[in-house]
Image (cartoon, grey):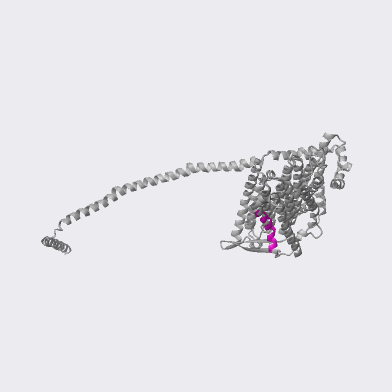
Amino acid sequence: MPLWLTAVLVPAMPAASFVALAALRRRIGQRAGFVAVGALAVSLAAALALFVRVLGLKGAAEPLVHASVPWAVVGGNAIDFGVLVDGLSSSVMLMVGIVATMVVTYAVGYMHGDERFAWFFAAISLFTASMFGLVSASNLLQIMVFWEVMGLCSYLLIGFWYERPEARSASIKAFLTTRVGDMGFLTGVILLFVRYGTLDLPALFRAAEKAPDRLFLTLACLLLFFGAVGKSAQFPLYFWLPHAMAGPTPVSGLLHSATMVAAGVFLVARTYPLYETARYALPFLACAGLFTATFGALLALTETDIKRTLAYSTMSQLGYMMGALGVGGLVAAVFHLITHAFFKSLLFLGAGSVIHGSGTQDVREMGGLARTMPVTNATFLIGTCAIAGLPPLAGFFSKDAILASLWGGKAVGQPLAMLLFVGGLLTAVLTAFYMFRLYFAVFLGQEKTHAHESRAIMAAPLVVLAFVTIVAGAANLPGGHPVLTALVAPQEHEELVLWVMATSIAAASGGAYVAWSQHKTRLAAVYGLERYVVYERGQGHFFERFYGFTFIKPVFALSEFLRNLDFDRLIAALVVAPVFKLSDALRHADIDTVYTAVFVNGTTRAADGLAAFDGGVVDRGVGLVGKVWLAIARAFQGVDLRAVDRTVDGVGEAVNGLGRILRKWQSGFVTNYALLMLGLGALIFYLAVILTRGKS
């Protein structure tokens, strides 16, 4: 099979699944899930084949596949429709294939019995096909087409249970908010096409490099980034993301890991040569990304809904990626994009398993689920350790790469790089704190509600994703022969910075310690001081004992020493209390109200002012001008009727009178005509004599 056909097959299979399921959903019924999974399995196999072929290129500059067909001609410039497969697109395509296959397999069990079962899998197939098409697109306009189809699919899937008011509201909010960012994306695409006459990605990069108008490119890149802000839920267009949890959990697992929110980061990574040429846009990306990362982590601290907590963590982790892109860490950002997709889909599916088994999303109503849901407990713990950045999981290596990029700061300068590095470390501590706090509250302690383990078809994807989360860090191990670096940016050199790695581990361990300290305090209040430390009694699963003994138990030993110094109260006063107060303040700020006051009400008032100006000034001015011209017209009408018409009528009447006189001479007698001629001849003779005398 030709390579270009293999590349086309990746998005074509889920697209064909969508067409078949949409047309035959009533006949297919509950078999729709297996149709969607089968189509995705073929796409995954094709993506894996392309990835293996790209590995064989060993960092060659030319892409593996770059094929296109004519699409349209605008202003004499051609726009093609094609595929582009290189190290970046093949890596992300493989990641999307793995995550989508696991999520859709999980959905077969999760959505079982739903009355719109087949339509769900039709919509999620189109959603996945759009992401595949976006990743493999060869030009910016083609990316935008799939970008918008994905936005439509998010509207359909978030509002899938449209009989629920919160689902309808959330789908509309997500659709409209991302459209705001898309206007910036569209404007940037238009500017680049007008300036360079092409939207083909390799040709556009070459044209921008040959004629590097940095101010223009900075404007265009910031507009493209504004589109990414909407899709990737960056500040200030983030507030649709937690509301999107109204959709089914498999939608959250796919949307928040490998598709929609990842599309914004992929767009910046795909067009990164433009950002490197412009230069001036990168510091803005770095600051905006790190601000979003810290802001999202703060919001997650006081959230009690398990899915919304994970949603805020998605916002925070995407900010991490944007920050890395802003400082020149392209490989680190792509690495974290891939690893984040694995462990975040694992966490969302684990949360769905918890909700499915316990019947609630409120963390305050959960507890002690480790005994009744052992598979979900073990896999959720792996995801928690990965997102916190504990070794040797994939999240540790990708987060360490981002922190190293922030410290290097080659695109922003050392002073700003140091500030960004501190922000990255703070976010790492907060992430470990709220994720372990979530894990402890859900799986340890007293069992507050009866729960049961999920079916095998839901548990199996959790195990697969947990395994991938463990081994995915090998894709770009620092200090050796990092595979991802060779695929995405062969010219970069990844160095092993041991002190950054040690600092990263300390940050994650510190956040976990604070979470554990709070958990002990809550358990002590319920059970008494002797019954709250499960690790010291050897209970829990393998991963709990492993991390408890290797990383957390030494911290607990130090904590016991500090507790004898009454240090826990100091930690609560200096660390926990201020963070919770800030998080409460941010949550009570009610961003929706702020946006309504600033944008909606502001726009309405501006429209009212313009309407008043139109009615009071423009309309009256036009009316006055109309009255003046009407008066002038009436004056001309009078002149026309009284002067012109009467003069013309008088001339006509004179001619008619003369005609009547002359008509009397028309008698028919020759003698009368002879007499008239004699009289006229005499008159002419005397006139000639008079005129002749005057001259003499």
Where on the picture, by quarter, is residue 679? Answer: bottom left
Position of residue 666 measured from the top left corner of the image (x, y, whole percent):
15, 58
Position of residue 637 measured from the top left corner of the image (x, y, whole percent):
33, 47
- Check if residue 680 falls in the magenta segment: no
Considering depth in this image, is 498 or 232 the residue closer to the camera? 232
Considering depth in this image, is 73 or 593 the residue closer to the camera? 73
**Residue shown at 56%/41% (left/top)?**
605
- State the quadrant of the N terminus: bottom right
Asked if residue 331 is positioned above or below residue 180 in the image, the reply reads below
Considering depth in this image, is 232 or 412 the residue closer to the camera? 232
Give the residue at the far front of this rendering.
27
**Residue 635 shown left or right of residue 98 in the figure:** left
Position of residue 135 measured from the top left corner of the image (x, y, whole percent):
69, 57
Where on the picture, by quarter, is residue 76? Answer: bottom right
**Residue 525 shown left or right of residue 259 in the figure:** right
Magenta-highlighted residues? 4-19
Give the residue at the far right of this rendering.
537
**Residue 635 shown left or right of residue 563 in the figure:** left
Considering depth in this image, is 455 or 479 the residue closer to the camera? 455
Kindly tell me whether residue 488 is visible in this rendering.
no
- State the quadrant of the C terminus: bottom left
Where on the picture, by quarter, is residue 242? Answer: top right
- Check if residue 14 falls in the magenta segment: yes
Q: Main secondary structure of the magenta part?
A: helix
Kindly tell me whether residue 676 is visible in this rendering.
yes
Asked if residue 386 is positioned above or below residue 572 in the image, the reply reads below
How many labels, in total?
0
